[in-house]
Amino acid sequence: MSRARWLQETKQMRFIEAYEGYQCKRLSQEDAAQLLGVCSRTFRRYMCRHDESGLDGLLDKRLNQRSHRKAPVDEVMKLVDLYTGRYSGWNVKHFYQWYQREHDGQRCYSWVKKVLHNEGLVKPGRKRGPHRKRREPAPLEGMMIHQDGSTHEWVPGCQWDLIVTMDDATNHHYSMFFVEEEGTWSSFRGVEDVIHDKGLFCSLYTDRGSHYWTTPEAGGKVDKVRLTQFGQAMKRLGIQMIEAYSPEARGRSERAFGPHQGRLPHELALHGITDMAAANRYLNAIYQPAFNAEFSHPSKQSGSGFVPWIGGDLDDYLCQRYECKVGKDNCVRFQKLILQIPEDPSRYHYVKATVQVLRHLDGTLSVMHGPRRLAKYDAQGHFLKPIKKQAVG
C-alpha cells in the first residue's frame, strides 16, 4: 500500500469518528473539525461529500487519475528495445549520453534510469555511505594505545607475525616482537612491555580478533559482556578496550606496517638473520629505537596520560584465570595436571573450596584463594618453593 493510499484511509477512519461524535451531539462542529485538523468550513464540505457518495467521496480523486506527465507505453517499450538491442550492459549514465546524442532523446536522466531499473535491465547502485572524517590523534600520550599484528615473510620461507603496540598520540612504538602466531599471550606481552616502560594507559584500540573479543555473529558486533581472557585482564587493570570494525578505523596502526614490511626484511637479510630469537634481539636493540627516532613525534599537548604502576605483581593481572574446585585430596585438577596444595598453617585444608588457577606469561601456574596465593607451580605442575628474601643490614 502506498503512503498516499494509507493517508486517505486514515482520513476516512478519523472522519467516521468525528462525524459520529457530531451526529450524537458529543462534539460541536468546531470540535469535530479540530479532531480532523481542518476548519469548520472544510468539515461541512466533508459531510456533504459523505452524504452524496459515502466514504468514497472523501478520497482524493487524483489517486485514480492517470498523470498527464506519464510517458506513453510505446515510448517506454521503445527505450527498452533500444537498450536491449544495442546497449545491453551499459551503465545508465553512459547510455543516457548516447540516447540524447544519437537518438535525439527528450526525456530526462532520472526518467531513463527509473525505466531501466523498473525493467530490471540495470541494477541500482549501492547507496553512498556517510561522509567520513579523519579522527584526530589523542592529545596526550598514554590516552590511547594501538595493538595489531602483521603476518608477512619477514625472512625467506618463514611467515611470522609481527606484534606492534604503539601510541596513538605520538606514533611511538613501545613494543615490537615476532611470534609464530598472534594470540592471547602475544597481546599480554605487548601490554606488559608498555606498562613496564611507561605505566598504565587509558584505552586500548584493537581489531575484533577472537583473542580480544567474543563475536557471536561473524562480522557482527562484539559482545562486551562475555569477555575473553584478555578482555578480563584489561578490565582488572581498568583499561578501556575499543573495538575497530574495519581496517580503515585503525588506519594509524595499519599504515605503520607499510614501512616495517618495506624495511625489516632487507635489514634482517643484510645482517644474515634467519631465526626468530636473533630477529627479536635485532628489533629491540637496533630497529625499534631507529624507527622511533625517525617516525615518532610529540603529542599535541604537553603532559602524559600514563599512570605509574603500583598494583603489585603485574603477572597476576596479565594472565589467564580459571575457576576450579578443590578435591577431597586437597588437590586441584587443571587441564590434565594435578596441583597439590601444600600444608597451610592458617587452615587445615581447602577441600571443596573455590579457587582460581592462574596461568602466567612464563608458563608457571598459581593457585589463588581470594587475594592469597596458596602455591606456585611450574608448567608441568611441580610445586615451586617460594624464594625467601634475605634481610638487609
Image (spheres, rainbow, N blue to C red):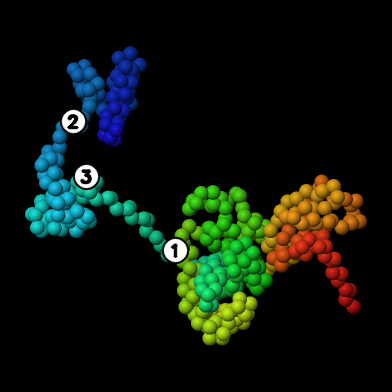
Q: Give the residue type that dot 2 points to.
A: Asn
Q: Distance between the residues labelled 1 and 3?
A: 37 Å
Say above or below: 279 vs 4: below
Q: Mark 3 points at which residue?
A: 119
Asked whether the residues under the numbered discs 2 and 3 touch, taking CB atoms below 8 Å apart as contact, a structural biologist would say no
Q: Residue 248 carries which label?
A: 1
Whether residue 300 is visible to the viewer of this picture, yes or no, is no
Query: Seen from this angle, which residue lies furthest top?
Result: 24
Q: Residue at x 15, y 58 (%)?
A: 97
Residue 103 location in percent, x, y?
A: 9, 54
Callout 1 secondary element: loop
Q: Nearer the viewer, mark 2 or mark 1?
A: 1
Q: Give the residue type that dot 3 points to.
A: Glu
Q: Nearer the viewer, mark 1 or mark 3?
A: 3
Callout 2 secondary element: helix
Tell which circle, 1 or 3, labels the residue nearer the N-terminal end. Answer: 3
Q: Name the residue under label 2.
A: 64
Q: Quadrant of the N terminus?
A: top left
